[in-house]
């Protein structure tokens, strides 16, 4: 999947540019990343860019997620003291486990303690994606520990703030090697 960040971020993409890329891309799931955006705005952009998924990284409630007309990837931030029941309340297609860094909603470049999230991972009925500080070097270990259905990477495949095709290639190779070792993760870049 390919992610378009519409949230406040150095990676934010303008709507026109996202539409052009979305039209050109075939055979890859298109994901829009939002943080606490008004529902109407999310629906409008999702329609205009023909998004396959809406990825919500803010404080969106389970009710908000249910109201979204597109399949939802709900990011939850894993730090000390998270409540599994709160996360289980999300009846969404995917739950994305990301890192808790105060003041940041995503794209932190920080990994969370994968071992501490194993119970959560296996309690969730949703498909599970893992994010946060993944790199070509560590993604295999994250897959080995959590057996996610997908992985999501941003900063770990960048050089000087720009996506780096060589790192993306190595990341995919590392995911495939981990899949051969028993994991089943897909790739997702934003
Ligand atoms: O990437 C951003 O700048 C961003 C900003 C605000 C909300 C979400 C954002 N990204 C969402 C993602 O899906 C990232 O890929 C994910 O958080 C992992 O990022 P990283 O730790 O850099 O791999």
Image: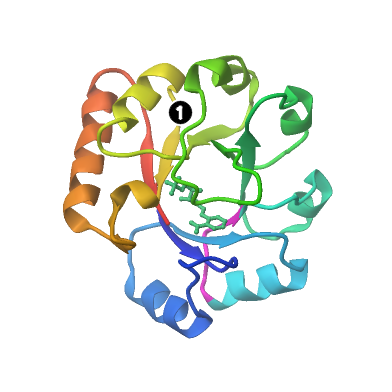
Q: Residue at x 75, y 25 (%)?
A: 83
Residue that protrudes farthest toward the bottom in the picture? 16
Q: Residue at x 37, y 39 (%)?
A: 186
> In which quarter of the view is residue 79 placed?
top right
Q: Is residue 62 above or below residue 2?
A: above
Task: Read off the magenta span.
Answer: 49-55
Q: Is residue 147 above or below residue 150?
A: above
Q: Residue 146, percent across and down? A: 46, 21
Q: Residue 165, percent across and down? A: 20, 57
Q: Quadrant of the C terminus?
A: bottom left
Q: Residue at x 51, y 64 (%)?
A: 5
What crowding class fits label 1: few (fewer than 14 Cα within 10 Å), some (14-19), or many (20 or more)? many
Q: Is residue 149 above or below residue 119?
A: below
Q: Which residue is mark 1?
A: 148
> In which quarter of the view is residue 185 placed?
top left
Q: Secondary structure at mark 1?
A: loop
Residue 54 falls within the magenta-colored stretch: yes
Residue 148 falls within the magenta-colored stretch: no
Q: Residue 56, percent across and down? A: 64, 53
């Amino acid at each position: 999947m390919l992610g378009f960040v519409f949230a406040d971020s150095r990676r934010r993409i303008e709507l026109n540019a996202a539409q052009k890329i979305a039209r050109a891309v075939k055979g890859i799931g298109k994901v829009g990343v939002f943080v606490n955006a008004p529902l109407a705005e999310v629906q409008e952009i999702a329609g205009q860019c023909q998004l396959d998924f809406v990825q919500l990284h803010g404080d969106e409630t389970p009710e908000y997620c249910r109201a979204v007309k597109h399949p939802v990837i709900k990011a939850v931030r894993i730090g000390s003291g998270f409540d599994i029941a709160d996360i289980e309340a999300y009846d969404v297609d995917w739950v994305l486990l990301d890192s808790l860094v105060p003041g940041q909603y995503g794209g932190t470049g920080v990994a969370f303690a994968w071992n501490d999230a194993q119970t959560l991972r296996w309690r969730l009925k949703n498909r599970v994606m893992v994010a946060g500080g993944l790199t070509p070097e560590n993604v295999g270990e994250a897959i080995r520990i959590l057996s996610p259905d997908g992985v999501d990477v941003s900063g770990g495949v960048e050089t000087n703030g720009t996506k780096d095709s060589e790192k993306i290639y190595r990341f995919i190779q590392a995911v495939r090697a981990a899949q051969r070792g028993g994991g089943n993760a897909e790739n997702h870049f934003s």
